Amino acid sequence: MLFIPLLILSIILYIVGNRISSVLIFFFFLFDGFQIVPEVLFNTHFGISKSIDFAFIYLISVFIYGFVKYEDYIPVNHITKLIMIYLSFIIISIGVSLLYYHIDLFDIIRTSRSYFFLLSYFIIRRLTKEEMTKLLKILFIVVLFQCCLFIIQAFTGIALLTGAESGRSGVITRFYNVPLMLYFIVFYAIFHNPYKGWQKIITTIIPSVTMFLPLHRSLMIAFILCLLIGIYIKIGGIKKIVKYFPFLLILILPILLIVVKATGERTLTDIESVLDGEFIEVGDDFELDQESTFMFRMAHFFERFIDVTESNVGIIFGTGFMTEDSEYTYRHFNYQIGLTSDDTGDTVQLDTSDICWSNFIVRYGVIGTLLYIYIFFSITYIYNKDIKVIGLPIILYMILLFIVSFTSDLMYQNRMLIFPLLLYNLLPIEYENEEIKYSEQIAQIK
């Protein structure tokens, strides 16, 4: 009951025009109470038990208000087309889940509600460029505070952010509850920092250091790779990079040593095993070890891929929008590879945070997964129009999400697309004009 008044307030603020505060509260709900408020406090005993439930209610309420209030609420542009293509697939998949798979409607709603967060674009685009810039700066400060808490917990072993799971690794405690907005904000800090002087240095170092403290091998490698790509684009080519190479070497070498030490021979062994196809022969005795190996992830995906591709409906739409804890899931699935549920002691059948491709193939099927990849990279390509300014942090962020998609489920989470949707209206006005001209040309042809 604690956050229902805040939800009502956020909707009222949007209606009366105080949209920065309203959307900020939406981000608070969308990103797990900024990972500061325990999830149990969001439980209202009225079917609303998670912060993302509040975000969904906000989304639907404000979207309906805007759709009725404004004639131009849904613009004709490239982002809108991509969103409509995706949501059309989701709506058809809901129909397949209900009429073909006979999954309970309540389970379908619980599973599919997060897919509609792309509608947030139409809510956010009502903010002016000045409001968007101010909102970004506020979110930047929020993430800096989260990073400070994460750094403290990494060196003290005391969990300060919610969702804490940890494992000791020398003087640093490996926590996996990385601030969710950090993956974008770190590139925003490095390449589009709103501060100057010593403030810029500090606000760049804090999120950059935080990226390494989870000691997540693929995350560190992906971050360094994206950082090098960003430097190459920002500086302007190989010749200029050579000029600054000694400085870059001093900056990156210690980080590379950390990556090599964290990676070690285990990663090489995992990759070799996958290339040899050993995961295909995994049996019932296969277990996830302490390091959550790459071989395990490939086996996890492969088992589900084989099952999904046994039917034409599965290839197109996946296995349906059932929940993990439903009776339908217990009756229809018996996957052997997966984490063990803390509640039941059985293998978790559907959802995993270890690799997003298992989630994609189960929920979207092969065709749906390819469709999502097309939409994902189409959104990324849009920012090529302004790649040396606001576009660069977004492009690097999207590349990072794709690289770590083989070791996390971040790319599968639609809320992670909120930043590309938020920053779209900060692109040069010429790009939007191109969309308007294109729409006028289509209208003339018709």
Image (cartoon, rainbow, N blue to C red):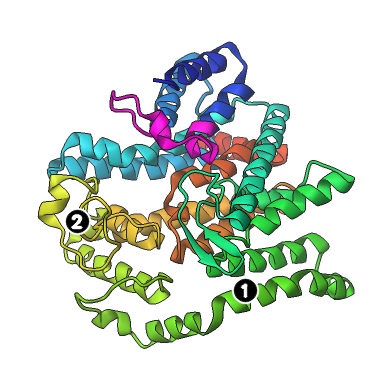
Helix, strand or loop at disc 1?
A: helix
Residue at coordinates 56% horizontally, 15% vertically from top-left?
13
- Is there any visible trace of residue 423 in the rendered image? yes
Query: In the rendered image, which residue does mark 2 sit on?
Result: 313
Residue at coordinates 55% horizontally, 50% vertically from top-left?
158
**Residue that protrudes farthest toward the left in the picture:** 331
The answer to whether residue 320 is magenta is no
Q: Earlier in the sequence, mark 2 or mark 1?
A: 1
Q: Which mark is residue 172?
A: none
Q: Is residue 194 left or right of residue 87?
A: right
Q: Is residue 30 above or below residue 211?
A: above
Residue nearest the observer in this picture, 286 or 19: 286
Q: Is residue 384 left or right of residue 319?
A: right
Residue 373 in picture, x, y percent from top left: 44, 57
Q: Is residue 185 left or right of residue 58?
A: right
Residue 364 in picture, x, y percent from top left: 31, 53
Residue nearest the observer in this picture, 339 or 329: 339
User: Label 1: how many residues lie within 10 Å, few (<14), some (14-19) or many (20+)?
Assistant: many
Amino acid type of the residue tagged 2 in the rendering: Val
Corner quadrant of residue 323:
top left
Magenta-highlighted residues: 28-51
Residue 184 in picture, x, y percent from top left: 62, 49
Corner quadrant of residue 137:
top right
Corner quadrant of residue 262:
bottom right
Name the front one of labels 2 and 1: 1
Residue 398 in picture, x, y percent from top left: 57, 55
Residue at coordinates 63% horizontally, 26% vertically from top-left?
127
Distance between the alpha carbons at the discs numbered 2 and 1: 43 Å
- Is there any visible trace of residue 191 in the rendered image? no
The answer to whether residue 37 is magenta is yes
Q: Which mark is residue 259?
A: 1
Amino acid type of the residue tagged 1 in the rendering: Val
